[in-house]
Amino acid sequence: MRVYNPDNSRWQDFEIDTPQNPAGLVACPPFFDMHTHVRLNGQEDYESLQRAAIKGGYGAALIQPNTNPRLSTKTVLNRHIELAQNAVVDFYWTCSLFGELQPDNERVLCYSNDGIEYDTLDILNAFRSKEPHLVLDHSQLYEVGGIFYEGTEKDLSKRPLSSEAISIYRNVLLGLECGFERFHIQHVSTKLSLQTIDILRKYAKVSCEVTPHHLFFSMKDIKDTNFKINPPLGSEEDRKSLLMGVKKDIVDVLATDHAPHDEKASDFERAPYGTSGIEIAFSAFYTTLGDFEKTVEKMTISPRKILGLKTTFDFDNLTVIDPEAEFVVDSKNFVSKGKNCVFDGIKLKGKIVGVKLKGRWVYWDGEFLFDKKESFED
């Protein structure tokens, strides 16, 4: 089987023992999602999230802090660790930038403000009160409101296209003044934001990510509440700039921002933000970029390097892909509890066939092979 090793950017042929004939298939390390949401409380839990992640070719995921209750105390963290204790996927956690919990570089890898409303004083006080560490920054001017960006045709509240870039500039500069040095900007959505990040890299260590939906769609594609995402979809110029940012390595990471909801209201005002997509993220990225090697690198070693995790390639952990297979997304068939997907009905290229984690095949051609007696009860 042809195997791509992103550690050295080389393709090699190896004999790999697989559950079925591997003709036409290729392999790479399992993906690492740097931006994942788990819900609990009857919605997406660690069991359904694990199955969705494996089906999408992932071997590890970083959980964001806006759970209920938030990941802001040791008690809440311990509950999450307990719920995920039987997982074959490696789950890591962020902690709220506004809570008492701090990163430990083992299970809690960094701070995050994702999914938590804040204003300038909130984030300044948080920076002042914390020991400096990597911060994952959801850059938003919450005080200006707005469901979509200016220029969107929907007759709903709008936020300025410049608001994300302004927030990036504000948050990074405030953090720098308080002794923080490393920032990772989440789900970048506009051309101006990329330009802002490029400027700030002269003063701080700033990395960034994009999602599959911001690379594939623009505001002209908004149809229903599955397209209510945060940050909103930008203009076609923004989308093309994000694509170019990935190709020129201005964008470091391809992340899902997997935000599952079991049900979304049809009313834009009442519907929650977010799209479920960890099961089809690789296919969406690969279809959009058309570059297998770059897609894999930004879904495997790039997030691990930013988070300080080892990147060594080994044959105990593999994701097997049919790079030529095409399929139409049908979110009704998702194993995730989140059926809200902007890619529903879209034809994508590149299908995950198998996943091997910690020395055993856990998924092959639609079937989960790990011990189904293991439980992840709330």
Image (cartoon, rainbow, N blue to C red):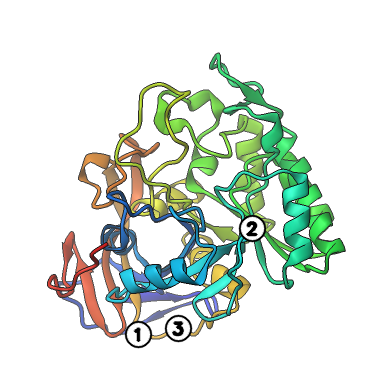
Q: Give the alpha-carbon distance from disc 1 to disc 3, as whole Å.
A: 7 Å
Q: Position of residue 304 (x, y in %)?
A: 55, 73
The residue at the point 24 percent across, 67 percent down is 376
For the residue pair 143 and 100, the one nearer the viewer reads as 100
**Amino acid tagged 2:** Phe
- Let me know if residue 142 appears in the view: yes
Q: Residues within 10 Å of mark 1 (few under 14, many from 20)?
A: some
The residue at the point 70 percent across, 34 percent down is 143
Q: Position of residue 191 (x, y in %)?
A: 71, 40
The residue under label 2 is: 98
Image-quadrant location for residue 183:
bottom right
For the residue pair 195 and 323, the one nearer the viewer reads as 195
The residue under label 3 is: 313
Q: Give the alpha-carbon distance from disc 3 to disc 2, as whole Å.
A: 36 Å
The residue at the point 80 percent across, 48 percent down is 170
Q: Position of residue 276 (x, y in %)?
A: 38, 45
Q: Secondary structure at mark 2?
A: loop
Q: Is residue 339 above or below residue 222?
A: below
**Disc assigned to residue 315:** 1
